[in-house]
Amino acid sequence: MPVIEVTDLRKSYGGRPAVDGVSFTVEEGEIFGILGPNGAGKTTTVECVEGLRVPDAGRVRVTGLDPVTDHERVARVLGVQLQQSELQPKLTVREALELYAAFHSRPADWRPLAERLGLTRQLDTRFGKLSGGQKQRLFIALALVGDPRVMVLDELTTGLDPRARRDTWRLIEDIRAAGVTVLLVTHFMEEAQRLCDRIAVIDRGRVAALDTPAGLVRRSAGATVISFSPSAPLDERDVSALPGLASVEHQGGRVTLSGTDETVNAVITLLARTHVTAHQLRVTDATLDDAFLDLTGTPGPTEEASA
Ligand SMILES: Nc1ncnc2c1ncn2[C@@H]1O[C@H](COP(=O)(O)OP(=O)(O)OP(=O)(O)O)[C@@H](O)[C@H]1O
């Protein structure tokens, strides 16, 4: 049985659909990513999974339970990460852990949890004095105190510097290694590519694609990219006749073509036939970013732009 099942989920705000027929299942032990541009409906979808919002239509099950009608039992299996504003700045790390342990009938021992999350030295530090990365680690610890089977992490690494983000990725991998299924909402391509077993790309309230990161890249129209600086300009007609060509870009004397392996072979043949030398020739696979652009028509935000 899948741990999470979402079938034809629909939710509108004031008559405007935010989630418009989303379906996916998450299997036990997976890190499942929900990736999409701003306003795509990601948070609304996971809030329905958490039972925080009531769907207009469709079916949501968490370990076979309805998150709305069986909220308490779902809350016992689901670890939900808090938003920053939900913790008092004066509360110490120890107090927060003790408080959250008290909320659960069978809590995990918070001491080894604090150690695993590198918070032992911060136990007496007030929440308001923690760094961004320490706060995120505390949120993960608080979500794990209930010993959940499933963790929902929504934009966990937004606002963290690249190093703290990488530390958080390791933690997410540790959580999965401990047998917890993870539902991860993100708009970072690198994060999704690195962590997720499968990704649902959500765009305008619908699932635009659902696949492994490598599968999404393979589906992208320009799955292979060849770039070089030609010793002489190429004939535009020869270029546009290349088989499987998805895009052409010229920048500062450099030509970048995306397409298939067949496109690459044809470019090499064309260069040989026209006696053009390709300087600094590079052939690379498309990235998840390219696939995302292909699927949604929106460039994925870069790490620098969003950090
Ligand atoms: N409480 C609300 N009332 C009215 N509209 C809402 C509400 N919450 C979300 N929306 C709208 O629904 C749409 C989907 O929002 P949602 O937060 O689910 O998207 P998201 O993919 O999580 O976006 P982001 O990455 O920006 O958080 C957006 O157009 C948003 O403005």
Image (tube, grey):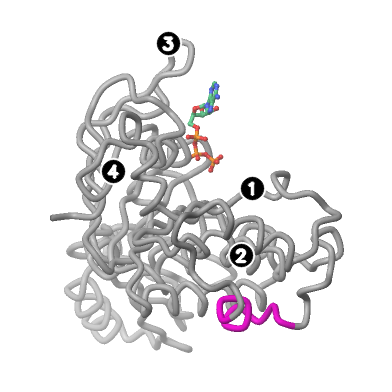
Residue 186 visible in the shown view: no
Is 90 displayed left or right of 221 in the figure?
right
Classify the position of the N terminus by image quarter. Answer: bottom left
Question: Which span is picked out in magenta?
Answer: 112-120
Q: Which mark is residue 104?
A: none
Q: Which mark is residue 208?
A: 4
Residue pictured at 35% horizontal, 51% vertical: 294
Residue occupied by mark 2? 303
Residue 247 visible in the shown view: yes
Is 35 displayed left or right of 29 in the figure?
right
Residue pictured at 23% horizontal, 64% vertical: 28
Q: Taken as a whole, is the magenta stretch helix, strand or loop? A: helix
Q: Residue 186 location in percent, x, y?
A: 49, 55
Q: What distance separates the C-alpha of mark 4 from that of mark 3?
A: 22 Å
Residue ranking furthest to the top: 15
Query: Mark 4 vs mark 3: which is more N-terminal?
Result: 3
Q: Relative to 68, does residue 62 appear above or below in the rendering?
A: below
- Asked whether the beta carbons under mark 4 and mark 3 sit within 8 Å of each other, the answer is no
Element under disc 1 = loop
Q: What distance separates the C-alpha of mark 2 from that of mark 1?
A: 21 Å
User: Which amino acid type is marked by label 3?
Assistant: Gly
